[in-house]
Image (cartoon, rainbow, N blue to C red):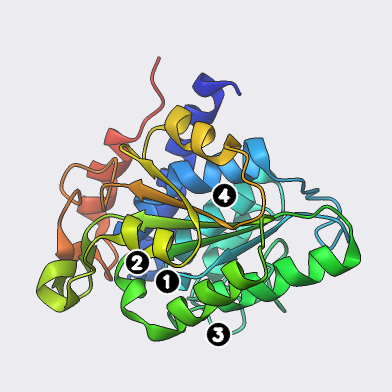
Amino acid sequence: MNIASLEKTCRAVRRDIINLTADAASGHPGGSLSSVEIMVTLFFDKMNIDPADPKMENRDRFVLSKGHAAPCYYGVLAERGFFGKEQFKSFRQINGILQGHPDVKKCPGVDASTGSLGQGISMAVGMALGARLAKNGAKVYTLLGDGELQEGQVWEAAMAAAHYKLDNLTVIIDYNGLQIDGTNDQVMSLGNISDKFTAFGFQVIEVADGNNLQQISDALDVAVTGKPKCILAHTVKGKGVSYMENQVGWHGKGPNEEERQIALKELEDEA
C-alpha cells in the first residue's frame, strides 16, 4: 500500500465532497468526510473490482448502509474511474445518475440502493450468502454509521451473519459520535459497541484512528475464519475541514461559496 498516494487520493475525495455539496447546496458533508480513509482504502487497495467492468461477476461488493454519505461514495468512484467528474453536476438532480442516496440502477459501481438506515447490513448479509453459494470467492463490505446502530434491523442482520458463519463479510462502523440531532449519547446511547458485536458472534477489531490509512488497512487485513468481522473505526465527523470537524451542524447541509473556498484551500495537495 502506497500511503502517500492514498493520502493524495483522500484529499481529492474530500475536495469532491465539498464541491458536490456546495454545488447542490445540500447533502451530507460531515459523515462523508469521516468515511474517506475507510472507503479509499477499500476501493484503491483492498477490493477486487474493475471500473471497466463494474458488474464483474466475482467482484467484491460494497454496501454503503449509511447512504447519506453518498458524496464520499461518488468521489471515490469518480477518482477510481467508474465515471467522469462531469457527472458531479447531476448530484441530487432528479434525472442525474448521482442521486442524494446511491441508486444501483443509475450509478456505475454502486452495488445496492441505500438510504433507509439499518437496511444495508441486511443486504450485505444476503450478498455474502450468495457469494458463498456461488463459490466465487467474493468478499462483501458494508459501512454503517454509529447512529444507525439504533435501528433494530441491524441486530437481526448481525445475528444472521453470525448464524451463517459469514467470514466473507466485513461490517465497518464509522464511529464519529454524532448524528443529525446531536451526540449518540444524547439521542440514544449505544453502550459498548465492541461488546455488543462480540456478543452477537463477530470478531471485533477496534481502530483507534479510523482516519489513519495504515490502521484501517491493518484492520481490513486481519484474517477471520468461521465468523463475520466488525471493524469499529473511531473517526472525526467533518474530518479535514477545520470548521466542520466535530460539528453536528454539518451533518446535513452544504457549504456556501465562501465556506467552499475555505475548505478547498485547506484541502490543497501538499507540495
Estimate the spatial distance between the alpha carbons at disc 3 and disc 2, rounded to whole Å: 17 Å
Q: Residues within 10 Å of mark 4 (few under 14, many from 20)?
A: many
Tell me the residue that label 4 is attached to.
76
Q: Quadrant of residue 120?
A: bottom right
Amino acid type, callout 3: Ile
Marks 1/2 in contact by CB < 8 Å: the verdict is yes
Question: In the drawing, does residue 32 fall left or right of residue 82?
Answer: left
Q: Quadrant of residue 261?
A: top left
Q: Is residue 197 above or below residue 7?
A: below
Q: Nearer the viewer, mark 3 or mark 4?
A: 4
Q: Element at badge 4?
A: helix
Q: Element at badge 1?
A: helix
Q: Which mark is residue 68?
A: 1
Of the numbered discs 3 and 2, the one sitting upstream in the chain is 2
| Residue 254 visible at all | yes
Tell me the residue that label 2 is attached to.
28
